[in-house]
């Protein structure tokens, strides 16, 4: 009860003090104009009563900082102007630290017990971090404040940090910044005329004010790096500038860039050069899709003026063609090519043993930086009974040499949709199972319905809103048991393809032992420069997220490589502003930026313009007059917020819009660009034309009509 009354008294006291400050506009006394206008009076008083002046200034400064009132920065400048550099530096340094500590203690007394009790579970990690490294992080915040000082004072009062630690770290951490401000104040105090504004000393002081945060941040980066790496002995000499783990899309690009700028780089791959994209992903899937599309064209013979066509094929030969395509692309990602570029390629299982060392094949490689590009693998959900059968994933699908009679594709994402259509066209009876209400969950409903209708027209059984519950094996029969709205649905099959997503490779090569942080979604946690919690270990590609596309892996790899090699001089933030993607069904679905669903969910004002390919001459000539181009713009403006294209070669057609969004070009620029006729690329210009028609200046056209009438007499 006594503590409760004490808290009430403190709260009332603080409220009264703050109320008086604002009610009587005491802030006007803490402005540069007021202090400069009374400078001579203050200096005269200081000359005759030094101790009283310094003591009063000290008490007021402590009160301002303790109550988190505005004006501390101005008071610091004023102290330099009135008292000179060293007296002001000493007084401000101790007053600011004492005031901050008082605010810290008040926050602790009033709120810490309540906050810690109410949010105990959520604060466990924060409390642990403060107990372990709180002093270091407080020091960096004091040196380069990410948050205002008063916020730091109040928030840290809620943590287990010791008062003594808070005080001395604040004292030391704020000293450099205090010195810069006090020095600027001394120069301001010497201005007696307008010409004084141009004095070299004043200009230098303000230049220091501007540069100090940059220098401090640089210093903080160096201290953080040293703090993180303090437990790991740094080699006196390094074998490599960078070691790259994984020779998939991200790893290959990172190694290529490092070699191109003459760095010494080692590239370690435990399986096959080229990674998933070449061996089990993009290349084989597109080869299979192309073969299946040729069969589909044959079945559409009458559309092209033929009575009929017959195509006989052997599924094994189709799959062998897929392997031929892989072999043809393989030299692009080969050891021979990268060795010729200057990359040392090592085949073996790597293990990171410290931020500076990687072990492979019995060797220990020392390196200044490491880039983890270990990729991802198919995620297999824990469905009871699935482990009893030889299920397929995008990894082992390519070993098939017999076409399954009845095939289940589990998943309605890009991989699931592409393989559903391809195997259906090759003659399998395909059932696609998706647990959410639509295929292609990231696309607009009209897109999903269009693709679904195409699949069903080609003989696919599409089961959305069906959750896979169990796999039953009854003799030679295999059954997938699903649930839909509480109803049991059985789907017999001969083969099942699991395509429900991918999980990043983060285990088995030293990250856990080293303590590299993971994101809650399972990827390696990286900052805007693609650094992990170890400043010289970088990450790119599927293992980093947030996008699992080959082209984003290569995009990230550039930033990871450049920051790993030149981050000490200049770091680059990875740019995710314009990320395109495409699902290679027939028709293709390609997108960049926002779609309608996302714009509505994010409450972003927008307009939609749509051009149907049914009106495009080239599409009509090729019997591909289906699909559309849909563009989102801000109301009344031609700036592109997002584009969705459904149709033949949608991925290729999207490039024009990706370029426009990247460089800030609007639909008027696209409309004013000559496109060859007749091409599918004209669809972009036609969509821009639709936007223009919807924004015709009717009033102006009315005046133009009158002008033409006048000209005719």
Image (cartoon, grey):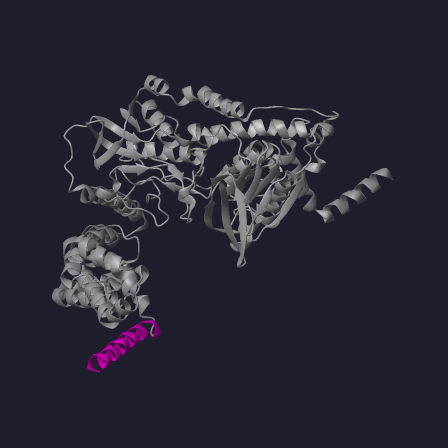
Q: Is residue 166 above or below residue 274?
A: below
Picture quadrant of residue 41:
bottom left
User: Percent from the top left, x then y, of residue 214?
Assistant: 28, 44
> Relative to residue 167, is residue 498 depicted above or below?
above
Residue drawn at point x = 40 percent, y = 48 percent:
382
Query: What residue appears at the point 49 percent right and 27 percent down from the top-left corner?
Result: 401
At x 39%, y 36%, the residue is 556
Q: Where residue 265 sits in the image (x, y, percent)?
A: 28, 25
* Residue 471 seen from this side: yes
Secondary structure, magenta segment, majority class? helix
Q: Is residue 543 magenta?
A: no
**Which residue is at 27% across, 61% downward?**
123
Percent coordinates x, y for residue 418 in the rendering: 54, 36
Nearer to us in this view, 36 or 103: 103
Q: Residue 309: which quarter of the image? A: top right
> Which quarter of the image is occupied by the N terminus?
bottom left
5 falls in the magenta region = yes
Residue furthest right as drawn = 713
Image quarter (top left, top right, bottom left or bottom right) of the C terminus: top right
The quadrant holding residue 228 is top left
Could you say where residue 692 lies in the image, as x and y percent from the top left? Answer: 67, 42
In the image, residue 488 above or below residue 557: below
Q: Is residue 541 left or right of residue 413?
A: left
Task: Count the labels in the image.
Answer: 0
Q: Residue furthest front?
A: 475
Front residue of 245 and 605 = 245
Q: Is residue 174 visible?
A: no
Q: Where does the magenta region start and end?
A: 1-23
């Amino acid at each position: 009860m006594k503590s409760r009354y004490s808290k009430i008294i403190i709260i009332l006291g603080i409220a009264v003090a703050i109320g008086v400050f604002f009610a009587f506009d005491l802030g006007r006394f803490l402005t540069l104009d007021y202090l400069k206008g009374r400078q001579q009076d203050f200096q005269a008083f200081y000359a005759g009563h030094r101790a009283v002046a310094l003591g009063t200034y000290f008490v007021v400064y402590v009160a301002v900082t303790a109550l988190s009132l505005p004006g501390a920065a101005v008071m610091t400048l004023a102290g330099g102007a009135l008292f000179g550099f060293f007296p002001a530096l000493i007084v401000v340094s101790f007053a600011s630290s004492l005031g901050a500590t008082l605010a810290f203690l008040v926050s602790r007394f009033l709120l810490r017990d309540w906050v810690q009790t109410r949010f105990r579970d959520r604060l466990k990690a924060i409390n642990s971090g403060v107990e372990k490294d709180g002093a270091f992080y407080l020091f960096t915040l004091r040196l380069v404040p990410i948050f205002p000082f008063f916020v730091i004072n109040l928030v840290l009062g809620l943590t287990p940090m010791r008062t003594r630690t808070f005080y001395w770290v604040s004292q030391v951490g704020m000293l450099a910044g205090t010195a810069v401000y006090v020095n600027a104040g001394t120069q301001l105090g010497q201005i007696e005329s307008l010409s004084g504004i141009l004095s070299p000393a004043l200009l230098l002081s303000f230049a220091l004010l501007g540069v100090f945060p940059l220098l401090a941040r640089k210093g903080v980066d160096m201290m953080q790096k040293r703090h993180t790496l303090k437990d790991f002995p740094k080699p006196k000499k390094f074998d490599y500038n960078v070691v790259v783990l994984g020779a998939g899309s991200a790893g290959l690009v990172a190694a290529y860039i490092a070699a191109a700028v003459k760095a010494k780089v080692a590239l370690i791959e435990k399986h096959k050069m080229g990674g998933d994209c070449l061996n089990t992903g993009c290349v084989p899937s597109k080869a299979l899709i192309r073969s299946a599309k040729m069969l589909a064209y044959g079945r559409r013979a009458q559309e092209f003026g033929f009575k009929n066509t017959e195509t006989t094929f052997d599924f094994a030969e189709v799959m062998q063609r897929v392997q031929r395509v892989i072999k043809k692309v393989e030299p692009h990602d080969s050891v021979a090519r990268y060795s010729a570029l200057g990359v040392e390629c090592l085949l073996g299982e790597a293990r990171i043993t410290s931020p500076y060392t990687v072990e492979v094949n019995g060797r220990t490689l020392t390196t200044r930086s490491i880039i983890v590009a270990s990729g991802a693998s198919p995620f297999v959900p824990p469905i009871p009974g699935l482990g009893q059968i030889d299920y397929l994933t995008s990894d082992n699908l390519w070993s098939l040499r017999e076409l399954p009679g009845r095939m289940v594709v589990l998943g309605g994402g890009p991989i699931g949709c592409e393989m559903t259509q391809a195997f259906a066209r090759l003659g399998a009876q395909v059932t696609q199972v998706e647990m959410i209400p639509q295929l292609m969950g990231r696309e607009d409903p009209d897109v999903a319905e269009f693709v679904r209708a195409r699949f069903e027209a080609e003989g696919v059984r599409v089961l959305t809103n069906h959750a896979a519950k169990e796999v039953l094996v009854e003799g030679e029969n295999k059954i997938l048991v699903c649930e839909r709205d509480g109803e049991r649905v059985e789907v017999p099959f001969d083969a099942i393809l699991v395509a429900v997503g991918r999980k990043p490779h983060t285990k088995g090569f030293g990250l856990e032992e080293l303590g590299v942080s993971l994101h809650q979604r399972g990827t390696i946690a990286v900052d805007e420069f693609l650094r992990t919690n170890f400043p010289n270990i970088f990450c790119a590609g599927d293992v980093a997220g947030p996008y699992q596309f080959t082209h984003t892996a290569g995009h990230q790899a550039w930033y990871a490589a450049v920051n790993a090699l030149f981050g000490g001089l200049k770091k680059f933030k990875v740019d995710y502003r314009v990320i395109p993607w495409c699902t290679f069904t027939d028709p293709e679905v390609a997108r960049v930026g926002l779609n309608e669903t996302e714009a509505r969910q994010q409450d972003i004002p927008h307009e939609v313009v749509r051009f149907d390919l049914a009106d495009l001459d080239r599409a009509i000539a090729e019997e591909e007059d289906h699909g559309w181009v849909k563009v989102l713009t801000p109301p009344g403006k031609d700036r592109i917020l997002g584009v969705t294209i459904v149709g033949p070669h949608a991925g290729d057609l999207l490039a024009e819009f990706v370029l426009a969004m990247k460089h800030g070009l609007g639909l008027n620029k696209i409309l004013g660009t000559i496109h060859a006729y007749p091409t599918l690329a004209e669809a972009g210009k036609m969509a821009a034309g639709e936007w223009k028609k919807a924004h015709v200046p009717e009033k102006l056209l009315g005046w133009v009509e009158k002008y033409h009438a006048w000209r005719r007499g």
